[in-house]
Image: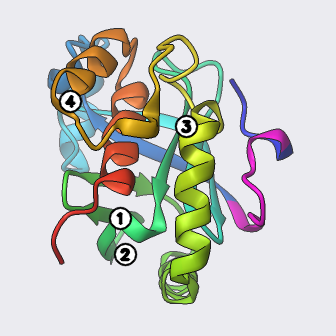
Amino acid sequence: MNFDAGMLFTGETILQAKLATALIRRSDYGLEQMAGEDAILKLFGQAGIEGIGGKLHLTNYRLVFDSHSYNRVTGVFSVFLSTIVGTTGDTRFTKKRITVSTHATAYEFIAWGIPALLKLIEDARTSLTEPSLDALKSEVEAHPQKVGSGFEQSGLDLGDIKAVGGKLEALISIAVNPLDIANIANVIELLTPMPK
């Protein structure tokens, strides 16, 4: 799956797209390290971390990460701007890391131009209105495949995801990689907002 214009929701526009690397912890997903990999990564404080190369798109509704096809883990996942509770950037020395936090999890990326990206994310977040957010939620319920990986094979009705219970377990059980799980968690956050 690749992120393209067909995955945009009504009224959604791309504000910026840039090369980026999504970071995941290998131990969280049962991935084994590659030979000699951790010795190099320890130098940069990233032992046990897997970098997934791809492209990060900022739209007026979400961040969308689209991996390159030659990674061990591939796919597309979204982080809806309304679920973000904080963003931080670390640009010390060789680090170019951004952390996007929601109530449920934190997403980490390596990218260039972090201060400008953080400002764009914050500007897009503050521009969201309740009517556009309500329309987005309806569209996500009607077209979950536009969010990214993990929903196309589920056959689940997301319209009543608010009764998470067994549906969460069913969604997680069909997830085939960490990007699917990221999508599922963020859609649940979007449709069942956490207290502020």
The magenta region covers 6-17
Which residue type carries mark 1?
Answer: Thr
Mark 2 to mark 1 CA distance (whole Å): 24 Å
Depth check: 29 or 140 in front? 140
* Residue 83 - label: 1
Please identify, in this view, whether the residue under mark 3 or under mark 1 is nearer the observer. 1
Above or below — where is 164 with respect to 196?
above
Q: Could you tell me the amino acid type at mark 4?
A: Ala
Q: Position of residue 16 (x, y in %)?
A: 71, 68
Q: Which residue is mark 3?
A: 53
* Residue occupied by mark 2: 91
Nearest to N terminus: mark 3 or mark 2: 3
The residue under label 3 is which amino acid type? Answer: Gly
Left or right, residue 26 beside residue 63: left
Name which of mark 2 and mark 1 comes first in the sequence. 1
**Cα distance in 3D space between marks 4 and 1:** 36 Å
* Residue 9 percent location from the top left of the image: 72, 53
How many angstroms separate mark 3 from mark 1 (CA)? 24 Å
Give the residue at mark 4: 39
Of the numbered discs 3 and 4, the one sitting upstream in the chain is 4
Question: Within the magenta stretch, is there residue 12?
Answer: yes
Q: Earlier in the sequence, mark 3 or mark 1?
A: 3
